[in-house]
Amino acid sequence: MRYLLFILFSMLLFTACQKTSSDENSEGKVKRYDFRGKVLTFDKNTKMASIEHEAIPGYMEAMTMDFEIRKPEWAWETIIPGAVINGDLMVDNVNGKYWVEVKGVVEPKSGQDASPLREDKAAEGKEILDFTLTNQDGKPISPKDYRGKALAITFIYSECPIPEYCILMSKNFSDAANEIAN
C-alpha cells in the first residue's frame, strides 16, 4: 500500500511540475520589442491597424505594416487614425505570428491634421517627384513612363524579420498584377 501511495504521489508531483504551453511562451518563444508608431488606419471589427512604426533596434527598420492589436480592450475604443501608440511588438517565431500590445495612445488634437503636407513628400492628388528605378528585367523605369496609367511599385527584401509578411506582400502584388492583366 505504501508503495502504491508513493507511485501516485510521484505521478502527481511529476504532472504538477510539467510546463504548459503558456509557460513555454513566457520563457522566450515569444519575443517582446519596444514599439512606437502612428496609426494610419484601424478596423475595430478585425482589430487590425496599419501602422507607420519607428525602427525597432535589433529587429527591423522603420516601415509601414499591418498589425493585429491584441491587448488591452480599452485600446480598441481609443485608437483612431493619426493616433500614436506605444507598446510592445510581440513576435512568436514558433507559430509565425506577431501582434502589438498597446501600453499608451496619444490621440491627435481636435482639428489638427494628423499628417501635415510637406513639399518633399508624396500626398494623394499631388504629382510625385520624378525618379528612376531598375525593374526586375534590369531596365530603368520612371513615373513619367507611366503618366496616365496605373502604377504600383513594391520592393522585395532579401531578409525579412516577419517572414510571412514579406512573402504575403509579394503574393498580393503578383495577384493584383494578374487581375489587372486580365
Image (cartoon, helix red, strand yellow):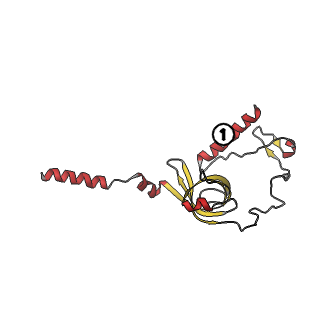
**Location of residue 165 in the rendering, given as x and y in whole percent from the top left corner:** 62, 47
Q: Is residue 56 above or below residue 157?
A: below
**Location of residue 153 in the rendering, given as x and y in whole percent from the top left corner:** 76, 45
Q: Is residue 90 above or below residue 157?
A: below
Say whether residue 165 is left or right of residue 16: right
Nearest the viewer among 34 and 42 is: 42
Say whether residue 50 is left or right of residue 4: right
**Location of residue 136 in the rendering, given as x and y in whole percent from the top left corner:** 75, 39
The residue that label 1 is drawn on is: 171
Nearest the viewer among 77 and 116 is: 77
Q: Residue at x 47, y 53 (%)?
A: 29
Residue 57 visible? The answer is no
Tag 1 secondary structure: helix
Is disc 1 surrounded by few (<14), some (14 to 19) or many (20+) residues within 10 Å? few
Q: Residue at x 67, y 66 (%)?
A: 107
- The residue lying furthest to the top in this view is 182
Nearest the viewer among 101 and 133 is: 101
Say whether residue 18 is left or right of residue 166: left
- The residue lying furthest to the bottom in this view is 109
Residue 156 visible? The answer is yes
Q: Amino acid at mark 1?
A: Lys
Q: Residue at x 77, y 37 (%)?
A: 137
Q: Can you say which quadrant of the picture contains the C terminus?
A: top right
Say whether residue 8 is left or right of residue 154: left
Q: Residue at x 56, y 62 (%)?
A: 74
**Location of residue 13 in the rendering, given as x and y in whole percent from the top left corner:** 26, 55
Q: Quadrant of residue 139?
A: top right
Q: Quadrant of residue 86?
A: bottom right
